[in-house]
Amino acid sequence: MAPTDDPSVPPLRRRGARMRSAVLAATVDVLTEHGLAGTTVGAVARAAGVHETSVYRRWGTREKLILEALAEQLDTAVPLPDTGDLRSDLVGYFGTLASLLATPQGEALLRLSAERDSGLPDHRLAYWTDRLDRGAVMVRRAVDRGELPPGTDPALVIEAVSGPLFTRALISGAPLDEVFATRLVDLVLDGARAVKPGA
């Protein structure tokens, strides 16, 4: 059954972009305070000052709402560096990503986008495919500058660094920080530079 409007919460008559911005910001706030289990559509609607039905009409499900809110936050919080040096770019990018994944919001984003029973298989694939493609831009630039051998697989380099980060965030619970990200970047770059063209 579709949720009904909560008459105890007066809506703020937000529409369009203003409504979207308010709801996405409220989603991150509620998630930070109450965790993934406590982030319900009703709680978000109350925090944003809109009717619950308005949220359902726009996003359809709680999972889609949370994923969009966190994806937008990640894109803002983890910009794509362009320092002219691949190691600096990767350390900056993955150091920031590691710090984000160590937060409740980052963990929730990773869990939602990785769960096969979340009802978001297409969203999950599109989200991470786009992020890997964005990261691969840094590697392509480095190949063009001659920092890595021609024929280097940019996506594989990005996956080789991000995989252990995701493993720690989802499984092991070991510390996630810039030191760990830097060690991963150096390990992967040593391997990438050692690959001979055509190998």
Image (tube, rainbow, N blue to C red):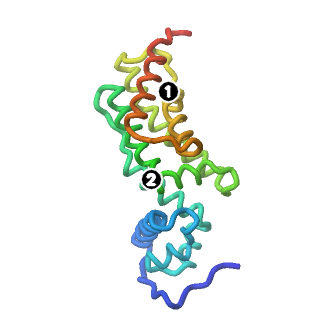
3D distance between C-alphas at marks 2 and 1? 25 Å
- Label 2 is placed on what type of residue? Thr
Which residue is label 1 attached to? 157
- Where disc 2 sits, the SS reads loop
- Where disc 1 sits, the SS reads helix
Q: Position of residue 26 (x, y in %)?
A: 44, 69
Instruction: Tell whether 140 sits left or right of 42.
Output: left
- Label 1 is placed on what type of residue? Val
Q: Quadrant of residue 3?
A: bottom right
Which residue is label 2 attached to? 103
Q: Quadrant of residue 21?
A: bottom left
Q: Position of residue 178 (x, y in %)?
A: 38, 37
Query: Is 162 or 84 nearer to us in this picture?
Result: 162
Q: Position of residue 101 (x, y in %)?
A: 46, 47
19, above or below 104, in the image = below
Residue 20 in sight from this viewpoint: no
**Residue found at the far left of this picture:** 83
Count of all numbered marks drawn on residues in the image: 2
Residue at 37%, 51% in the rendered image: 76
